[in-house]
Amino acid sequence: MFVAGNGGANPRHAILFATDVPPSRVVRLIDRYLMYYIRTADKLQRTARWVESYEGGIEARKISYVATEA
């Protein structure tokens, strides 16, 4: 699963967030990621900039999401 990419004037490639996720858990993982984004991002902030501004970056988010899915 790739996340936090965007196009436009300052494009950014998406980042590999999770691998080998069973199909039965994909929707749940995406849902958790998006709900956290909605609750913590500034209004109109894109996911790529949100990840950059988060202390620990995507690695910190990976650990918390993947741990809850195990």
Image: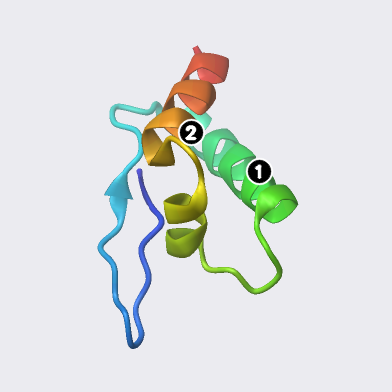
Q: From what the image shows, is residue 37 above or below residue 47?
A: above
> Which residue type carries mark 2?
Arg
Q: In the image, what residue occupies the spot 40% across and 40% down?
A: 58
Residue at 51% x, 45% y: name it: 54
| On screen, residue 51 above or below 25 | below
Which mark is drawn over residue 36?
A: 1
Left or right position of 63 against 9? right
Return the residue at label 2: 61
Secondary-structure class at tag 2: helix
- Whether residue 59 is situated above or below residue 57 in the rendered picture: above
At numbered mark 1, what does the secondary structure look like: helix, strand or loop? helix
Amino acid type, label 1: Tyr
- Colour scheme shown: rainbow
Classify mark 2: residues with Cα within 10 Å, few (<14), some (14-19) or many (20+). some
What whole-number distance in Å separates the C-alpha atoms at marks 1 and 2?
A: 10 Å
Q: Position of residue 19 (x, y in %)?
A: 29, 31
- Which quarter of the rendering shows the N terminus? top left
Can you tell which quarter of the image residue 38 is in?
bottom right
Viewer-proximal residue among 38 and 43: 43
Query: Is there CB contact under 8 Å for labels 1 and 2?
Result: yes
Whole-percent x, y for residue 68 in the image: 57, 17
